[in-house]
Amino acid sequence: MRACVRVRVCGLAVAILAGSWCAMGAERQARAIRRSDVVFMYDNPQRYEAYGATVMGWAGRRDADHIRAAHAAGVRQFSCSVGFLTEGRGVIDFSEDFLDAACRNLAGEPFIVPWLWDHQHKGHKYYWWCTNSPLYRKYLFQRLAETVAAGCDGLHIDDYRGTSGSVTWRAGGFCPHCLAAFREYLARHVPAEKLAKLGIRDVKTFDYRRFLLDRGVKPDEYNRRRAGLPLAEEFHHFQVMADNDFVAAYHKRACELAGRKLTLSVNSGLSSPHALVVAPHLSYFCCEVGHGAPRRKPATHPVYIYKLADGLDRPVCSTAAGQDWAFVAEHKTYELVRTWAAMSYAFGHNLMAPHRQWCYTKAKGTHWTEAPTDEYAWVYRFVRAQARLLDGYEAVAPVAVVYDNAANRRGRGRIEGICTDLAAANTPFRVAVAGDHWLPDYRLTAGDLARARAVIVPKQLDLDAAQRTVLDGVKAAGRLVTWPDRAGLTKLVPPPIRIEGAGNLWAVPRAKPGDRKAPVVIHLLNRNYDPKADRIVPRKDVTLHLRRDLLPGRKLTKVTAHAPKAKPLALRATVGDTETTIALSHVGLWTLIELH
């Protein structure tokens, strides 16, 4: 295996804004993505101006003249992509021995990338390539040299999990290169006594595939039985770390070739512990996130993703899943997509401009949709126009929700439902990440949770002793809430935001840490979506009640409402002893309420 190159990040710290939470990293790197950036997934210079493009995040054209032209057109950062799984044509052309680069299952057979079932080249399907294969790595480093030579500002890796992504899904990881590397891993990391109990006397000749087959494990039963098989946890951990280390080494080589630091992003949707391992190496996530388009209602899943990303101190440039875009293309649900964009920016992240999208269904396979510019561009121009109310802003959150990576690796300790419940109740919160040996750089500390008025935990936790002690201190202070104890939360944190006159409105408060002169911003998201008409139904005569202890010490009296396709509107604020009240005559898709 190649040497591990780790980018260390310190445990999370917190900047305090007027007694409320604003989540930030202790030694956070310079933010690669600004809150007001308009990020393109696919390159199209004819759309730069219409959308106000500032970042080429994924599939930028590898051409030096083109990149220089993009910079001149206002694209500040230009990334190009290499795919760890989607390089079917390139590898087949690279070497006659291309099958040596293919992943193998327990039966010893190569297998294809499932969502590329309709692709082939020279009579071959698009195989799932093995990132432990020397031949495949040779190909990938050649692709890297070609990419960096174009003068890009960043490297994007699609499907970065490589071989490790096949272990629990496609029963992969059993090619000769993986088996040889696993022998080295066992020799270094697993006690000889444990191996001996399994009958493994000479690890130098050990063949894990043969070991399983000799014990009667049938290839078609492997996935079902995998978790209970001997050395299964070690095998999975080895594959995950091997891919993670290769990503780090790959990025290191990119920076060496460029002679400067390049940003690094990967397509990782953050929805599982495996998807989070790479976080310390990243400048940002640039990824697919499921939005549930066929349900025909505003999405909730991205809230969890965005909040978890904040806890990891990494921006997210998101797009929806291929199945989502296939639905949008078929049903033309453009307003639904606009709710996705508004939500992403309200929570401090960036839905990539959807001018062109990859679509996928089992029936059609890969296909594409081109969106009408006038359906989406005006939302993104609004983002650019409101940059001063987006950039530098962090979540104001009196509540912390604990994400336990160890528990989630075992299928428990889920917090997505908690995140959705709090967002729907307009209870501002942030996520505190409790790491394990997959996320060793993220730790709960007493200082991290000291100023949270309430700390919410799921019922099942697997914290190590040090992090458990931190929560014991929170419990002793009377600030620990085990969900779904809503009454306990309300006792500690009375509803910070109430909305009268309409339901299904979300209010998301944000502020600049340490800058009391900067306005506070409340993002008001209207989630009253009519699926038959594909439109957000405006709400009239809405009253917003903000408890003053959400932002203690600040008397906010000057209010301006900003909305897409509307002029700024001055509003009146009534300041009482316990709350500030703001009346709005009209609430459309998305309103930014600026308070001084």
Image (cartoon, grey):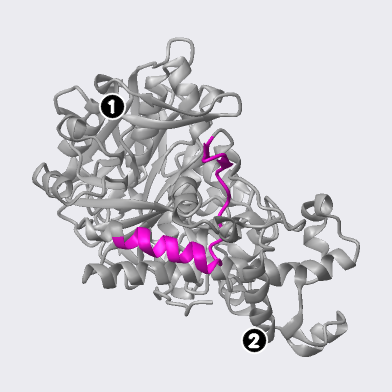
The outermost residue toward the top is: 533
Circle 1 is placed at which residue position? 583
Please report contact status of discs 2 and 1: CB closer than 8 Å, yes or no.
no
Observer able to see residue 266: yes
The outermost residue toward the right is: 216
Residue 184 lies in the magenta-colored region: no
Could you tell me residue 584's position as x and y percent? 28, 24
Q: What stretch of residues is rendered in magenta?
A: 119-145
Residue type pointed to by label 1? Ala
Q: Label 1 neighbourhood size at 10 Å, few (<14), some (14-19), many (20+)?
A: some
Circle 2 is placed at which residue position? 188
Q: Which element is circle 2 on?
A: helix
Q: Is residue 516 above or below residue 291?
A: below
Could you tell me residue 443's position as x and y percent? 50, 72
Residue 282 appears in which quarter of the rendering? Answer: bottom left
Q: Label 2 neighbourhood size at 10 Å, few (<14), some (14-19), many (20+)?
A: few
Comparing 62 with 47, the one in front is 62
